[in-house]
Image (cartoon, rainbow, N blue to C red):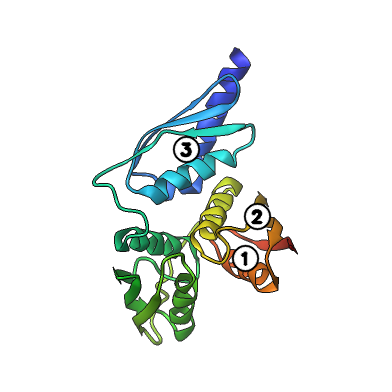
Amino acid sequence: MLLATQTGDRIESSAKKSYVYKTYLKDDDITIKTTDKNVVILTGSVADWSHRSLAEQTVAGLPGVLRVDNKLEVKGDKIEENSDAWLKMKVKTMLLFYSNVSSINTEVEVKDGIVTLRGEAESEAQKELTTEYIKDLEGVQSVTNNLTVKNGKKSTAEKISDKIDDASITAQVKIALLFHRSTSATAITVVTKNGIVTVSGLAKNDAEKALVGKLVHNIKGVKSLKNEIKID
C-alpha cells in the first residue's frame, strides 16, 4: 500500500512539474489520482478539448502509468466537433507547439473551414511556416495568410526553457499527428528520451512518412528525430 502511495505521489508530482501542465494547463482545475494498479484518474475541468487531450497524453507518457481514465470536463458551452470554433481551437493549439512560429502575435479567424491569419511574423520564413503547419489540419479548406513581416525587428517567437520533459514532448507530438488529416489515421508510436523522439509504425507512403518528420522536427523540446516508420 505504501509503495502504491509513493508511486501515485511521484506520478502526480511529475505531471504537475511537466512543461504541459505548467504552461498550457496552469489555469485548469485538474486532480490526479493513481489507483493501486497504476491507473491514473483525471478529474476536474479544463478550458477546451485540446487541454483535455494534452492532460491525458502527458500523464500517459510518465513512467509507471499503465492507463489513464480521463474524466475531465470541458468548461463553457460545448463546441460541435468539426465546426469553425472547433477548427480554430486546433489551429491555435498547433501554433503553441512550434518554436519557430508565434502564437502570441498570430490572430486566427475561421469561416466555413477557411482559416485567416492576421498579426505579425518576424520573417517571410516564419510566415510561410505558419501556413505550412496549419494547411493540412483536418477540416481546413484553405489558409489566407495576412501576417505582416516585421523586418529587422526583434524576434516575436516565444522564448522557452532549454529543458522540456519527455512526457510533454510526446504529448505535443501525439496531438500534432492526431490533428493532421494525412497522419491522423496513421498507426504511429511515439517515444521520447532526453528530447530525442522516435516515431515508429506504418505509413501509407513515403510522403506520409516525410510529413510526420516535418511536423515533429520543430515541436518545442524536440532535439532530434528518429523516423523509423515503415511503408505499409
Looking at this view, is 103 or 212 the one in front? 212
Q: Position of residue 178 (x, y in %)?
A: 52, 57
The disc placed on residue 188 is 2
User: Which SS class for mark 3?
Assistant: helix
**Label 2 crowding class (10 Å Cα cut-off): few <14, some 14-19, many 20+?**
many
Residue picked out by circle 1: 212
Compared to 73, does 5 lie above or below?
A: above
Residue type of the residue flagged with mark 2: Ile
Please provide percent x and percent y for residue 123: 44, 83
Q: How many marks?
A: 3
Secondary structure found at label 1: helix
The x and y percentages for residue 202 are 70, 59
Identify whether 200 is placed above or below 73: below
Identify which amino acid the numbered label 3 is placed on. Lys
Residue at x 36% of width, y 62% of height: 87
| Residue closest to the far left | 77
Q: What residue lies at 28% left-to-right and 47% top-to-bottom?
A: 78
In this orientation, which residue lies closer to the viewer: 115 or 197? 115
| Label pair 3/1, CB-CB below 8 angstroms | no
Quadrant housing the N terminus: top right
